[in-house]
Amino acid sequence: MLFFLLACSGDKNESTLRPPATESFISDDLLGKFESFGLPLYYGDSPTDVSGTYLFREPEIIYNNSEYWPDPNNSWCEFHFTFASQGADVYTLEAEGITCNAYSSGQEYYISGTDSCFTLYGKSTGSFEGCEVETIRLISACLSGSGDMDNPIMGRTNTYVENSSSCDYVTTAGGTLQQGEMAIYGFQDNIARKQ
């Protein structure tokens, strides 16, 4: 098993570690923090094709430095994530809640990796209780022979786009990651099955 993990980890001395477009929204320092807290990063310029729909079941927290998230009054939501290739190592994501009323689409994810193991890098801007929030999200996994994502691990962090009174409310009320907080989590059964 250890050999398999090492074989998937990629070589950080490769000439192309990750898509250049990701450098505009995620620094090497932030990537290092994600990695040090348990998110594997798969570098390289020959990733597998991850097009398709996958079921992401209940998360299992690996690392979380948030005082307020997750909200103990809210249950987790299971999602279908559909990745559609746009060419040149770019995918769009459609996320549809299965056990909750949630939906988003159109977010771009860039991919790096070698062979079956990959990392997806995405950034989105949205509103939470009137506060504009920018979220950086990473997803790392290895595709199995059957096309499932083995050991999918997701990491995310938030930045407030505008420091307004609405953001002050979010800080005190909780329910989402606060500015600079980070969460890393796997998923039930360590698999995201292709649908």
Image (spheres, grey):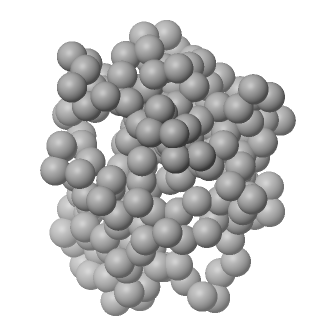
Q: Is residue 11 left or right of residue 28?
A: right
The residue nearer to you, when weighing 10 against 96, is 10
Kindly identify the residue that appears in the image at 27 percent across and 81 percent down: 168
Kindly identify the residue that appears in the image at 44 percent across and 14 percent down: 46
Kindly identify the residue that appears in the image at 21 percent across and 16 percent down: 15
Q: Is residue 16 visible?
A: yes
Kindly identify the residue that appears in the image at 59 percent across and 46 percent down: 1
The residue nearer to you, when weighing 121 against 61, is 61
Residue 60: where, in percent of width, then height?
61, 69
**What count of labels does the image hold?**
0
Q: Which corner quadrant holds the C terminus?
A: top right
Seen in the picture, residue 67 relative to 94 is either above or below; the reply is: below
Seen in the picture, residue 85 relative to 28 is either above or below; the reply is: above
The residue nearer to you, when weighing 163 against 34, is 34
Q: Is residue 126 left or right of residue 78?
A: left
Residue 155: where, in percent of width, then height?
43, 56
Q: Is residue 129 visible?
A: no
Q: Is residue 181 left or right of residue 173?
A: left
Residue 83: where, in percent of width, then height?
62, 29
Examine the image and state in which quarter residue 24 appears.
top left
Residue 70: where, in percent of width, then height?
52, 78
Q: Residue furthest top?
A: 87
